């Protein structure tokens, strides 16, 4: 009698993890890494891995598990979420970001609000300048606020200038903006109705103590304000009189606790000043003008 053959059953192929399973595991991993809003960030990462938005994710867009794992690993290592996603919101814009630029912050929007309150009509600004433009966030928002204006953005980092040009093109503003790689206002001879700047203002010794996303990943060039955090203001204030057109306005971002000192510096340079607070009540924007 021939030997009995054992019945061969097909091996069961494990099912791919569902989006819910991926999100649950990712949320746990991000929480363990010290991320403040792990569930929310897990959803953003999953949406990017699915090439969709949060609505598309909720509607069942398939998540590329391998891509999601790579994005998750970067964020769990405390790389800023904006760099992982490749973009960040600012005012009503979505801007491309990279490690060559500071990530736009909501506090910086105070500069635009202050400038619009001081120069409310479209005709009041025809030429504008953004010193230390980074992503171009300030300049590009300002160009939308003053539709008759042309703007110049200056940055010392060539990669930042390239990114700002890219953002201008994304927004259809490339014909109204020029970006120069330079050391502050050194190459400029013209005058502007509005000068904006978010200069580096963190004290050098404090940078290492900032949250890991900032200290390890954001460009030191855009953060380091020298030993007392005021080096950029000392450089900028003497240049402003030659840059401002008659009746022109400059608006500078301030670091926490710097308002009195920078206001005094500006007054000594012959400027009138006014301050505007951010949402936390800290003086964030300093307006400067001359008679």
Image (cartoon, grey):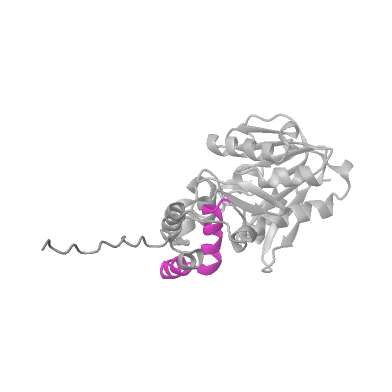
Does 50 appear in magenta? yes
- The location of residue 138, given as percent across then percent down, is 69, 47
Magenta span: predominant SS is helix
- The location of residue 76, given as percent across then percent down, is 42, 61
**Residue nearest the viewer, comparing 57 with 261:** 57
Quarter that holds the C terminus: top right
Quarter-of-image position of residue 4: bottom left
Quarter-of-image position of residue 274: bottom right
- Give the residue drawn at x 83%, y 55%: 117
Visible residue check, residue 259:
yes
Relative to 193, residue 202 above or below:
below
- Give the residue drawn at x 67%, y 39%: 170
**Residue nearest the viewer, comparing 168 with 196:** 168
Q: In the image, 114: left or right of 131?
A: right
- Give the residue drawn at x 52%, y 43%: 100
- The location of residue 147, given as percent across then percent down, is 83, 41
**Residue nearest the viewer, comparing 204 with 159:** 159
**Residue nearest the viewer, comparing 218 with 229:** 218
Residue at the extreme left of the image, as rendered: 1
Quarter that holds the N terminus: bottom left
Visible residue check, residue 184:
no
Relative to 189, residue 21 above or below:
below
> How many labels were placed on the picture?
0
Q: In the image, 154: left or right of 3?
A: right
- The location of residue 8, given as percent across then percent down, is 26, 61
Relative to 174, residue 55 above or below:
below
Q: In the image, 160: left or right of 144?
A: left
Does 107 appear in magenta? no
Stretch in magenta: 24-51
Relative to 258, residue 132 above or below:
above
């Amino acid at each position: 009698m021939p030997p009995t053959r054992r019945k061969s059953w097909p091996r069961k192929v494990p099912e791919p993890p569902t989006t819910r399973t991926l999100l649950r595991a990712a949320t746990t991993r991000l929480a363990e890494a010290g991320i403040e809003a792990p569930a929310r960030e897990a959803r953003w990462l999953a949406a990017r891995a699915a090439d969709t938005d949060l609505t598309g994710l909720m509607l069942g867009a398939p998540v590329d598990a391998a891509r999601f794992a790579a994005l998750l690993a970067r964020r769990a290592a405390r790389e800023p979420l904006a760099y992982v996603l490749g973009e960040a919101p600012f005012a009503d814009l979505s801007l491309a970001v990279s490690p060559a630029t500071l990530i736009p912050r909501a506090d910086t929007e105070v500069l635009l609000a202050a400038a619009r309150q001081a120069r409310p009509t479209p005709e009041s600004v025809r030429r504008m300048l953004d010193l230390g433009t980074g992503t171009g966030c300030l300049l590009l928002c300002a160009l939308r606020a003053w539709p008759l204006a042309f703007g110049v953005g200056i940055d010392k980092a060539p990669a930042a200038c390239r990114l700002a040009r890219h953002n201008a093109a994304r927004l259809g503003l490339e014909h109204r903006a020029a970006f120069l790689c330079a050391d502050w206002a050194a190459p400029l001879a013209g005058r502007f109705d509005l000068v904006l700047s978010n200069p580096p203002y963190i004290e050098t010794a404090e940078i290492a103590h900032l949250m890991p996303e900032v200290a390890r990943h954001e460009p030191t060039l855009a953060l380091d304000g020298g030993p007392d955090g005021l080096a950029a203001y000392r450089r900028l204030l003497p240049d402003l009189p030659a840059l401002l057109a008659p009746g022109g306005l400059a608006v500078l971002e301030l670091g926490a606790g710097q308002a009195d000192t920078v206001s005094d510096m500006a007054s000594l340079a012959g400027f009138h000043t006014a301050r505007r607070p951010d949402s936390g009540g800290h003086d964030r924007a300093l307006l400067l003008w001359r008679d």
